[in-house]
Image (spheres, rainbow, N blue to C red):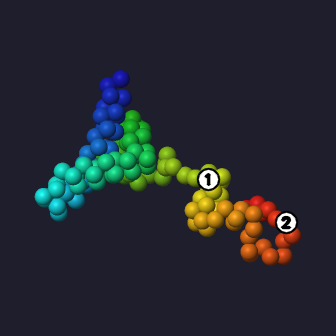
Amino acid sequence: MARKFEAIVISAVGTVLPSILVGAIVGLFFMSSFWYWTLGIAVLALCYIILDRVHLRLYIGSLKGLSTWQLLKYGYAAPELRPTMSAAEYEWYMNWIIYSTPFRLFRDRRRRNDSSSFHHW
């Protein structure tokens, strides 16, 4: 139980402290509005850190008993538990965001000789 509590503390400190530190570094360049920059950048960095699942990797790494340097490398650079797109999300992303037209679903100019009206990737 003590090891899990230690892992929770390491995970919480390892996600919140770097985001506050990044916000404070940016805030140093704008001393008149230091706290606005610090809090704004810290919230954005914390959102990115949480969406990247750094807290989960730090938690799992500390339960595995990794040393400090190995834990930081595992938490911030390991490819495990990173969010990825499924095939359907990738197709939606390519059609609606990259090509930015829904008509790409029904007609593809690269397939001029194909008589079908709907193509599958």
| Residue that numbered label 1 is attached to | 89
> Given this view, does label 2 or label 1 mark the residue nearer the observer?
2
The disc labelled 1 sits on which kind of residue? Answer: Glu
Q: Quadrant of residue 10?
A: top left
- Work out which quarter of the rendered image holds the C terminus and state it: bottom right
Q: Are marks 2 and 1 in contact (CB under 8 Å)?
A: no
Judge whether residue 67 can be spotted in this image.
no
Q: Position of residue 80 (x, y in %)?
A: 49, 48
Give the residue at mark 2. Answer: 116
Please tell me which residue lies in front, 78 or 103: 103
Q: Is residue 74 above or below residue 90?
A: above
Three-letter code, disc 2: Ser
Q: How many marks?
A: 2
Q: Secondary structure at mark 2?
A: loop
Q: Residue at x 84, y 71 (%)?
A: 114
**Residue 86 in the image, given as x and y percentages of width and height:** 62, 51
- What is the x, y in percent for residue 73? 37, 52
In percent of width and height, residue 41 lies at: 28, 54
**Looking at the image, residue 13 lies above or below residue 85:** above
Q: Image quadrant for the N terminus?
A: top left
Q: Residue furthest top?
A: 1
Check residue 63 in the rendering and tell me which mark sits there, or answer none.
none
Residue at far left of view: 32
Q: What is the quadrant of residue 118 in the picture?
A: bottom right
Could you tell me which residue is drawn at 65 percent across and 58 percent down? 91
> How far apart in space, not on screen, are marks 2 and 1 (Cα)?
24 Å
SS state under label 1: helix
Q: Is residue 71 left or right of residue 107?
A: left
Residue at left offset 31%, top offset 32%: 6
Mark 1 packing: few (<14 Cα in 10 Å), some, or many (20+)? few
